[in-house]
Amino acid sequence: MIKIAVIPGDGIGKEVVAEGLKVLRKLEQLSNVKFDFQEYPFGAEHYLKTGETLPDWAIEEFRKFDAIYFGAIGDPRVKPGVLEHGILLKLRFSLDLYVNLRPVKLYHPKLTPLKEKEKIDMVFVRENTEGLYAGAGGFLRKGTPQEVAIQEMINTRYGVERTVRFAFEYAKKTGRKKVTLVDKANVLTYAHDLWQRVFAEVSEEYPEIETDHYYVDAMAMKMVRSPEIFEVVVTPNMFGDILTDLGAEIVGGLGLAASGNIHPRKVSMFEPVHGSAPDIAGKGIANPLAAILTASLMLEHLGLDKESKTVEKAVAKVIEENKVTPDLGGSLKTHEVGDAVVKVLEVL
Amino acid sequence: MIKIAVIPGDGIGKEVVAEGLKVLRKLEQLSNVKFDFQEYPFGAEHYLKTGETLPDWAIEEFRKFDAIYFGAIGDPRVKPGVLEHGILLKLRFSLDLYVNLRPVKLYHPKLTPLKEKEKIDMVFVRENTEGLYAGAGGFLRKGTPQEVAIQEMINTRYGVERTVRFAFEYAKKTGRKKVTLVDKANVLTYAHDLWQRVFAEVSEEYPEIETDHYYVDAMAMKMVRSPEIFEVVVTPNMFGDILTDLGAEIVGGLGLAASGNIHPRKVSMFEPVHGSAPDIAGKGIANPLAAILTASLMLEHLGLDKESKTVEKAVAKVIEENKVTPDLGGSLKTHEVGDAVVKVLEVL
Ligand SMILES: CC(C)[C@H](C(=O)O)[C@@H](O)C(=O)O
Ligand SMILES: CC(C)[C@H](C(=O)O)[C@@H](O)C(=O)O
């Protein structure tokens, strides 16, 4: 029995998680896997009612699960930052989910906004619990003409090393042959000097894996010009945030972007990269494929490689057959896409 | 007489600056403008011979010029960082060139790697002398498993305000109607909170100009999906570095990307965004259009709007006629492109 905590969250989060669960339930019928889903109400509604974002007892409870399946949070009635910090970043930091794993895969050439690209298949390993996200900093003379505002980018040998190591291990495990480091060591001569040294050291333990390096600005260009050359990319938190959104866009947008917030030996959290999208919430037109691919990523993490691949194949199939929502050029509703994936699963 | 200090620098820097100067000299013949060019040898060669990157006396001398025209620096024989810090960043910081102005303009639809894009025309106002580029930070327990490396993102009211103000003034001056702020205030709750407050305040002085806001990750996506919606974008140093390279790529690559390092009331420095490109240096195939468009940007800054526009038009024309280098799909040599621009100027 695989125990999964489910946090649908706000807006389209609820709608897409429902489809992800539909797919996981179908897998139960088709295989020996059994899930025990337990739902939690955290999100804007809960916050507005109770003043509570994510209580500590919930964090403790989550530790007993095998995984957390997360939808999206955010609501125009809540001040920006409150739910991001109180829920999303709190989960990442409290559970020490030090890797943000984000595949960038082109499922069909029609999906990319780039001319003449057929194959894009890379995975980002974004450091997820330090760097500019440490939350350290402060103001001097706030609100005056002499104000100084400081934000600290904090990296540790411990944090960088385990992330870089994860990247190489992931490459090995998934049969990828190259790991690319992206940093800005020519300017960030302290924090990213550490990244360069650690990367050089750790890479020596993996002689069979090729290494490569780009400065972040050059990387942003290269991802548009030649995304096909990348396999695994490891990068600090903030750059990972930017580059993975860019990555999502070049393979069809947030409607397809999955992510895992991972600690290899602890309960990990899986979420589509997109937000709660208040503008389209409740209309039944949200694309559930990111949430379904996120479920696939969760299965992979749980060691259910076969099931993970089956779900991914089913998604590729509905895309191929254009059984998709309007953002991908289709005309199906959210639940119809979920149904289509389930139907494909039945015959795969 | 307009006094211009010329630093061709390394690799293709020398080759493309020669073409820029060719164009400026042609302008002298065709108009009343007169230039006095004085060349300086700074770059890798000079550093390897003398150990000197950019001496303080040169900085003092530059202050007496009307502008600095810069090629590119960088050489495989010099440790990465040395010339960037010793020359490029030293120029920016010593001369207090607080704005990095980078147009992102699509001169012809064939140039963009994006499907179905016809019109892209925005200008980045990148803060250029603070943020993560402040150079502040340090190590604790360097080289041990307990190492901590810190890099400080330092922003000041003074530095942010003058940059934001420049963005609005530039919009006004050039007839643009919208200024977009790009930051990550939802995570960088100190440094970018300052940016948000200053932007809100300054924008009130420009009621005729629309404002807009994107988080940096969403911006990276939007620049691929809908770059046509942007006019002027103002953003902190590090994000500007990344987004302007992405911007260059979506309008044809570094071969066309111009930039100005500007202080509105002091000598300013103009450089193509590309580097010295050791791999193609000496082959005569470098694209000189970025350097020529950089000359156009310099002319605009010097108040020579008509001449600036004429050069830009000539560049658009040679692109239209495919009189370009291989990177843009043409077969011309560096000097032939320069010649083509000059020829167009004669009949414009
Ligand atoms: C919502 C925000 C705090 C978050 C981040 O910056 O990490 C998001 O952009 C993401 O990438 O998951
Ligand atoms: C060479 C490097 C220091 C520089 C920067 O980061 O600003 C370059 O990338 C640029 O954008 O001009």
Image (cartoon, coloured by chain):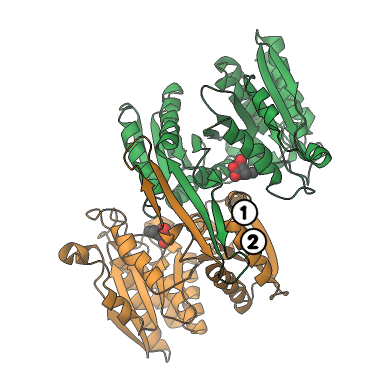
Chain colours: A green, B orange
Can see residue A184? yes
1 and 2 marks on the same chain: yes
Can see residue B118? no
Q: Where is residue B247 in the image (x, y as percent from the top left)?
A: 52, 57
Q: In this view, does A157 lie to the left or right of A102?
A: left
Badge 1 or badge 2: first in the primary sequence: 1
Q: Mark 2 points at which residue?
A: B196
Q: In this view, does B109 lie to the left or right of A26?
A: left
Give the SS element for disc 2: helix
Give the SS element for disc 1: loop
Residue B177: name its quadrant: bottom right
Q: Which chain carries label 2?
A: B
Q: Position of residue B221 (x, y in %)?
A: 60, 49
Kindly give the residue lying farthest to the front in the view shown. Answer: A141
Q: In this view, does A53 lie to the left or right of A252?
A: right
Q: Position of residue A5 (x, y in %)?
A: 69, 23
